[in-house]
Every structure is written in structure tokens, then in C-alpha cells.
Image (cartoon, grey):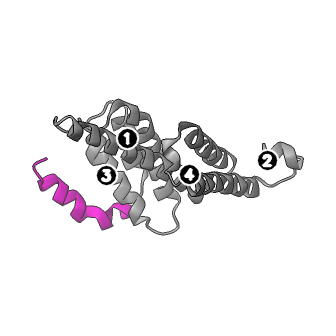
Amino acid sequence: FLQKSVGGNVPPQLLSRCHLKMGLWTREVYEEETKSAYFKDVEVLGKVLGWFQSAIDLNGDYKAWNAWALANFQVVESIEAAALQRAEAQNSEAPSPGPQESIAHAVHAVQGLVKSIILARQIALQDILRLLTLWFKYAGNADVEPVLKEGFQSTPLSAWLQVVPQILARLRSPS
């Protein structure tokens, strides 16, 4: 869209930043107007993710990958929270980790977080913690497990040093 409207002479880095801004603005305008999270509207979520994806396709810098990863991570958390609320309302046990509808977003979140960690100029602790959260929830899932393994192999070892205490604590916990 933006490439066609400006004639094709725009550097990909600038065009990528424009697409990223369009995604961020789409999200902000929707949330301001509706007082609701953008990811609860499938159409708006699709537009936001589409802008972020096109920013990645054009340049693939840290900010674009991080925005895409965070959007997918928020969708996963929202789906899980809704499933937990339904389970509580029905007085049943909590749903198994990762309702089926969140799997695709979990895969995208893992891919985006890994790429964000790799591209970050300094250690992105928040991204690593989010990746750990997804690992602990989806480690046994057949769709997410290979993406996690690939991500762990490609991230620098130095990134994991700050979260060793969290990993050890999780390994020691019974659940």
C-alpha cells in the first residue's frame, strides 16, 4: 500500500518504519476509540499484525520483530485468560495449557521473541522472560516445541545468563 502510493523510491528501512507506525497507530486509535484491547477484534488484530508483518518483510529490524512478537504474545495471554474465566465460571478445572486457538499465536510469538532477542543491541530481559513463559506453558505442544528448540539454538548464550535463576526455580517447582 505505502510502496505503491509513493512511487517505489522509498528506502526499505524507511518504508518498514512507516508500516510499523501504521500498525502501532491502528492499535492505539482502536483502543482509544473503543476503550477495548485491539486484539479482541479479529479484524483489527489482522490489520495490526499485517502492518507488523509487512514491516518485518521490508526490513526486519528489532522494533518490527518485537512489535509482532508482543502482539502475538498478548493474544495468547488473552485467549488463556478467557479460557481460565470460562473454566472458573463452570466450576471446572483450569484448561490445559494452550487452548488450541492460541497455538498459532504462540508459535508466532516464539519466533518473534527469538528474533527480537537476536537483533537486540543489548540483552532484552523482558523478551527473554516472555519466551520463558511460553516455554513453560507450551513445551509439550507438538507445534510449539520445535520452534522453541530452534529458537534456543539460535539465541546467544549470553542472553540466558540473566534468567538462570528463573529457570532453576521453575525446574524445582512441582507443577
Residue 120 coordinates in the image, percent (x, y) = 51, 63
> Given the image, on which type of amino acid does mark 3 rest?
Thr
Asked if residue 99 is positioned above or below residue 67 in the image, the reply reads: above
Depth check, front residue: 171 or 20 = 20
Residue 10 coordinates in the image, percent (x, y) = 83, 54
> Given the image, on which type of amino acid does mark 1 rest?
Ile
Q: Quick one: label 3, few (<14), some, or many (20+) residues within 10 Å?
A: few
Q: How far apart are marks 4 and 2 (CA)?
A: 26 Å
Depth check, front residue: 30 or 151 = 30
Residue 148 coordinates in the image, percent (x, y) = 36, 43
| Left or right of 121, for residue 77 | left
Mark toward the start of the polypeptide (2 vs 3): 2
| Closer to viewer: mark 4 or mark 1 | 4
The residue carrying mark 2 is 2
| Left or right of 2, for residue 123 | left
* Direction right: furthest residue: 7
Q: Contact, CB < 8 Å: mark 4 with mark 1?
A: no
- Can residue 8 be seen at all in this image of the molecule? no
Q: What stretch is highlighted in magenta?
A: 158-175
Q: How far apart are marks 3 and 1 (CA)?
A: 15 Å
Residue at 32% across, 34% down? 99
| Element type at mark 1 | helix
Asked if residue 78 is positioned above or below residue 64 in the image, the reply reads: above
Mark toward the start of the polypeptide (4 vs 2): 2
> Given the image, on which type of amino acid does mark 2 rest?
Leu
The residue carrying mark 4 is 34
The residue carrying mark 3 is 133
Q: Is 165 contained in the magenta span?
A: yes
